Image: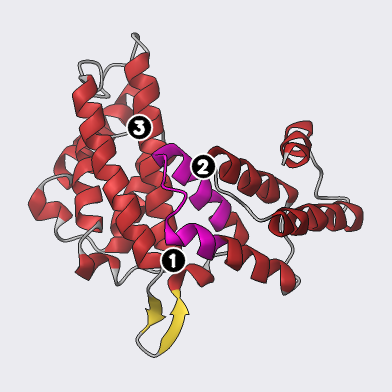
Amino acid sequence: TFRMSDEVQLLQCIGNRLKMGDATGKLNGSQLSLGLWAYASLERPHLGIIKSFSRRLRKKNVRKEMNCGEITRAVWAAGQCMKQLDLLVQDMASPSGTDVEALADEEVAALREESVIMAYTLSGELLQPASTTSDHKKLYGLNVNQIADLLRSYVLYEFDPSHPIIAEIIAHVQDRIANGDYIKTVDISRILWSLQRLRVPVDIQFVSTLVQSFSDNTQANNHDTCSPKTLNTILRS
């Protein structure tokens, strides 16, 4: 019978192999982002994976081949892994096998720095053209749900609100709404919440546009229910 302890040990063994230079060096950007996503989704952050994958994802020849979805997935996953590590370190009863029990604060800080550098580097890549034959930036291939994920990750990284990508994101969301794209109320809430936490000086017209989209969607679509938490976030904005 496969037990939870077996899963932990298996993931640890896989991570221990993949973190090695000869293994990490064979992975492309898509595979690296998927690997980070897997450990984040399973809530089993692996220190070696976070470090080695974050470093390789910063390499120009790796990141330039990544599409916008893969970049967002990597940024989100690394942020989630760091969040999970913080919780494990704070918990004196960390589960055995996570290799976090004896982790010193400086080690966590070092890993966070690796992830933050990766997040800034990949965010810069999102501002690059999607192809050699087009000036269309990679960022503009993201849907609003992915944008909400990206902004939520920026909160975890304590991202610089003056970074050029923030203004590009706001413009991209405005374009999506102007084109008549449907935006879920929960994504509107997540975007507004993240911008608040990042202390982004948002134009009142942008907030009004999002709130109007929220109002139109809730009236037109009974399936898109609005939870009290979502409504509270929107009203506070």
Name the residue beneath numbered marker 3.
44
Among numbered discs 2 and 3, the one appearing first in the sequence: 3
Indicate the position of residue 82 as horizontal and vertical percent values.
35, 34
Q: Please report the bounds of the magenta region as a residue range.
A: 147-169
Amino acid marked by disc 1: Cys
Q: Secondary structure at mark 3?
A: loop
Residue 3 visible, this orientation: no
Asked whether the beta carbons under mark 2 and mark 3 sit within 8 Å of each other, the answer is: no
The residue lying toward the viewer, choosing from 202 and 175, is: 202
Mark 2 closeness class: few <14, some 14–19, many ≥20 residues within 10 Å? many
Residue 80 x, y percent position in the rendering: 42, 38
Secondary structure of residue under mark 2: loop
Dots 1, 3 in contact, CB < 8 A? no
Residue highlighted by disc 2: 198
Residue at the farthest left position: 22
- Compared to residue 207, the image places residue 70 above or below, namely below
Indicate whether residue 113 is drawn in magenta: no
Residue at 52% from the left image edge and 44% from the top image edge: 152
Say which label, 1 or 3, has the lower sequence index: 3
Chosen colour scheme:
secondary structure
The relative height of residue 111 versus residue 65 in the rendered view (above or below) is above
Q: Please identify the residue farthest to the right as the structure is shown.
A: 219
The residue shown at (36%, 36%) is 81
- Crowding near the residue tagged with mark 1, few <14, some 14–19, many ≥20 C-alpha atoms within 10 Å: many
The residue nearer to you, when weighing 131 against 9, is 131
Q: Is residue 223 left or right of residue 83?
A: right
**Where is mark 1, residue-wise?**
68
